[in-house]
Image (cartoon, rainbow, N blue to C red):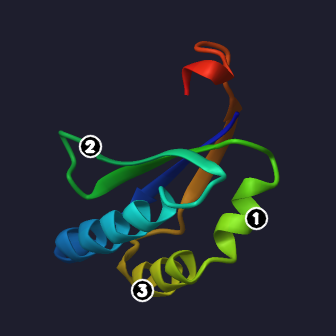
Amino acid sequence: MFIVHVFVDVKSDRVEDFKSASIENARNSLKEPGIARFDVIQQLDDPSRFVLVEVYRTLNDPARHKETPHYQKWRESVEEMMAVPRQSVKYQNVFPGEEGW
């Protein structure tokens, strides 16, 4: 598994718009065969901060995801909602093993 955490700081007046757009993207992303999990989480003490937790089955699946119409729509719609450019950190799973996903 290939796991990406995307950290997003959203402008305070655009939080609800960002949530809506990100939930729509996540729902559609879960229909992709290369995605095992796609979570949108919001920080409790600062609701303008989010993490997208994306779990891909292979190293090639993120590139496939970025080619989908729902991802491109999300990217374009949320760009101006961000207070700063988003950042990501990439991981590999240790536990559970791939059969646990």
Where is residue 45 shown, x and y percent of the image? 18, 40
Front disc: 3 or 2: 3
Instruction: Indicate the position of residue 72 as horizontal and vertical percent values.
Output: 57, 82
Label 3, secondary structure: give it.
helix
Q: Closer to us: mark 2 or mark 1? A: 1
In this orientation, which residue lies closer to the viewer: 85 or 68? 68
Looking at marks 3 and 2 on the same chain, the residue that comes earlier in the sequence is marked by 2
Of the residues shown, which amino acid type is indicated by label 1?
Ala
- Left or right, 33 with respect to 38, comes to right
Note whether residue 24 is visible: yes
Q: Quadrant of residue 24?
A: bottom left
Residue type marked 2: Gln
7, 40: nearer the viewer = 40
Q: Which residue is mark 1?
A: 63
Q: Which residue is at a point 77% across and 44% down the rendered structure image?
A: 58
Q: On the image, which quarter does residue 4 sit in?
A: top right
Residues at marks 2 and 1 touching, judged by CB atoms closer than 8 Å: no
For the residue carrying disc 1, how many other residues have a C-alpha within 10 Å: few (<14), some (14-19), or many (20+)?
few
Tag shown at residue 43: 2
Q: Which residue is mark 3?
A: 77
Residue type indicated by callout 3 = Ser
For mark 2, give the secondary structure.
loop
In the rendered view, does 1 fall on the left or right side of 6? right
The total of numbered circles placed on residues is 3
Where is residue 28 shown, x and y percent of the image? Answer: 44, 67
